[in-house]
Amino acid sequence: MSITLFWDGLLEASDYLKGDEVMFGGLRPWGMHAGNILTLVAYPYLLFEQMEKMGKKPRFKYYITLNDWEPARLAFPKGKEFEHNVYPVDTSFEYTLDVEGCHKSIVDHVEGPTREKFKIIRKDFPGVDLAFVRNSELKENPLFMKMIGITIKDSKRIAEIIRDSTGRPVLTDEAQYAGAVCPSCKSSQGKTLFENGVVSYECSACGNASSGKLGSFDYWCYHIPLFAARVPSLKIAFAIRGLDHYETKRIHAGRDILNYYFPDTGFPRNLIAPMLIAGDGQKMSKTRGNALDMDTISIIKACRGNKSENIKVESV
């Protein structure tokens, strides 16, 4: 697996990329704060800019996935020590209501403003084909759904891979990384089985019992196997990822899951973007309550030529 880091890594990527690859960035659809802008807009922009200086025309297919099958909120039943033993608190983003009431779901609410952030790429690099894709829109993709089925059925093996790849403790017998969303009440809390091509689901919230083919349900899925599902289905060759994915070795876990279940699919080359540090000295994050929206051009300027692994808000 090829991983390059920060500004020097961007220069290296601009050298080995041809400019017509399929590239990827993903977003948990709570909204797009400045840290997301850095990774998903500013760093791609600077990569494209550098490639043009080298005489290469950026013609990438750039998928931005809105991860509506991730759980909107996660519980850690065994505590944060077992950070990969997770369970959805309520439902997926797909069925999380827009609290402002102007859209049906939070994903619908977020998608428009998210697209606006990418206008600078569309304007300055018109050869780049931007494509916004929700996980739920990949239900007809057999490779994507194959990985969802594997994640339901083979949760113990996936837990073992995550444990071995990250070096973090995982209670493998208690792991669950994907499940159906109740067709009746839209809860993600329940028991999902996948045997002989049939999904059986029993909802803990409303008691509904359902069964059907894999494509009959919507799902929630943990982000690590969810990334492994997207690589073969979208034919991703290159990804720009946040520093936290590298430091926690979640990239390595995704690679090892993909190699185990799709050995003929190459893992994408990865460029790691620097981390945006908020005013409180911590990583900018919605969950930490320190997320800010900032001007995209200012973020681009702060990153251009900056070799640091951390970009402080004060410098933007």
Image (spheres, grey):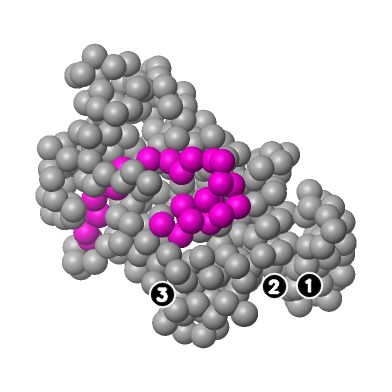
Identify which residue, 44 or 35, lies in the foreground: 44
Q: Secondary structure at mark 2?
A: loop
Q: Relative to 209, is 316 on the left or the right?
A: left
Query: Which mark's residue is nearer the viewer, 3 or 2?
Result: 3
Residue with the mark numbered 2: 189
Q: Which mark is residue 203?
A: 1
Q: Which residue is mark 3?
A: 168
Instruction: Look at label 1 and name its amino acid.
Output: Cys
Range drawn in magenta: 252-278
Which residue shows up at 13% across the image and 54% down it?
314
313 vs 158, left or right, is left
Residue 162, compared with residue 132, is above or below; it is below
Q: CA distance from mark 1 to mark 3?
A: 30 Å
Dot 3 falls on a residue whose secondary structure is: loop
- Choose the circle earlier in sequence order: 1 or 3: 3
> Is residue 61 magenta-colored?
no
Image side of residue 119 versus residue 92, left or right: left
Q: Position of residue 157 (x, y in %)?
A: 60, 67
Q: Quadrant of residue 41?
A: top left
